Amino acid sequence: MKRTMISATLLAVVLTAGAAMAGEHPGKEYIEKNGYNGPATCEECHKGIAKKFLDTVHWKHASKVPNVHGKNIDPKKEYGMKNRIYSFCNGNDIVNRLKEIPANEVGKSKLAGCNTCHPGNQQCEVGNCEVGVENSIDCLICHSSNYDYSKRKPYKNDKGQVVTGQDRSKEAAMAVGRPTVKNCMTCHESAGGGVLIKRGFAFNKENDVHAAKGMVCVDCHKGKDHKIPTGLDPNNWANDGVLVACPDCHTEAPHKSAVYNTHTAKIACQTCHIPHSGGAIAKDFTVWDKQANKFWEPSTLKRDVQATRPVYAWYNGKVLDSPNYIGPDASANRKDKASKIYPFKIYHGKAFFNKETGDLLSMDFAPPMATGDARAGVASAAKILGMKNPEKVAKDATTGWQTVYFANSHLVTKRNALTCDSCHSDNGILNFANLGYSKKEIEKLTNTELYFNKSMEIQKSKEKED
């Protein structure tokens, strides 16, 4: 059947379904009759959407990053998980694309890689836009509420390539709709080596007021043509050029209290409403730990959700990238009109550095995952990246630490938000001296008269609730 005939048939189904279709994605009857043929089926209604998706961060894993600067940042290039080298991942999609890990001491191997979450089948490099590559897009992993994740496992095809399976079943396709929390969090909660390792947040009713209200991720991160709005996290560079922020919904004066509303000019919403986070606070890629399955993982210090107190700093969206530091640059301060005080999870990563240039070196996880030999991973990565004398680079590499600022953007609370005395008492959480305030100003900011009445009001309100 020709494409125009299919479209006409599908349109007729949609128009005649009437009230029976309420709350359902149109085209269910067509899929039930004809099955699901990947993006080609979606394109019957969403014409051209697959090719547009190829120009998004979820596909490319990279973008221009005009807010990031450093000696190794070329403003003409795109950066992201595809090619960045920093101490949380220490390897990128170029070095650690889906591959077979060599056999360990008990002769077992496995298929793994940093880009296992990429919504394609891995037959092309991440970000590849060859003709026809859009046919490999896995639309349902984000849009089906009945997706069988066991079908999305890596395997070797008949050419010996390591590829990713997809659930393209009729059952999954008939459950298509807006992405659910599970659709998003399957990748975003498990990034960086396991659940709650990288970002350290759980979007559920116990830990986030938005989830408790029944909201889902795309209620705030509303995409257009699959370009998803995000914030400017110093750790997470790549973006689709569209931003999301609390005032989009809550305005610049979100409180009943005028006193609180005066704070929004210089205090980010997250500072008071995200008092804790979790996840990894440090990793050592120079020392790998043997797991029960006889494979090795980098040594990792991690914390449960809500277990980590943030560090507070001025931030205006501009990021400094260096071998030893990734975070707010020096332009962020109390005198800068674009800066606000934000909360950050501070992460420290120990890794290998190029002895000649001082640059952070990438690591191919396959060798150390099999044997625990970290320098073998450095040598392999250097070879993949085309560096001269990769074995010598690895042998001569020095070790050191990099500090990375992770934005606290989730785990939002209303009931347990910071109150006046949280910051303004003598033992308050804000280090006013580090934030640029003078001794005289600090004495004024920590005067009990400043916060006592308001704090008593809040205390009595909570006592009534209990």
Image (cartoon, grey):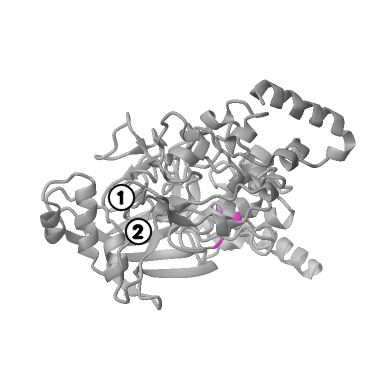
Q: Looking at the image, which is closer to me, 177 or 448?
A: 177
Q: Looking at the image, which is closer to me, 75 or 36?
A: 36
Q: Residue furthest right?
A: 19
- Using the image, determine if residue 419 lies above or below residue 249: below
Taking the spot 29% from the left edge, 37% from the top edge, the residue there is 73
| Image location (x, y in percent) of residue 264 | 59, 44
Secondary element at tag 1: loop
Q: Which residue is mark 1?
A: 95
Q: Is residue 394 left or right of residue 154?
A: left
- Between disc 2 and disc 1, whose residue precedes? 1
Q: Please rate how many residues cluster around mark 1, counting C-alpha atoms within 10 Å: few if below 14, some from 14 to 19, many from 20.
A: many
Q: Please rate how many residues cluster around mark 2, counting C-alpha atoms within 10 Å: few if below 14, some from 14 to 19, many from 20.
A: some
Q: Looking at the image, which is closer to me, 250 or 164?
A: 164
Q: Are marks 2 and 1 in contact (CB under 8 Å)?
A: no
Q: Which residue is mark 2?
A: 100
Q: Is residue 166 left or right of residue 388?
A: right
Q: Is residue 13 left or right of residue 53?
A: right
Secondary element at tag 2: strand
| Image location (x, y in percent) of residue 152 | 53, 54
Report the mark closest to the observer, 2 or 1: 2
- Using the image, determine if residue 278 lies above or below residue 344: below
Q: Residue furthest top?
A: 4
Quarter occupied by residue 453 = bottom right
| Image location (x, y in percent) of residue 19 | 89, 36
Separation of disc 2 and disc 1 at Cα? 13 Å
Could you tell me the amino acid type at mark 2?
Answer: Glu
Could you tell me the amino acid type at mark 1?
Answer: Val
Taking the spot 76% from the left edge, 36% from the top edge, the residue there is 26
Magenta segment, which residues?
A: 271-276
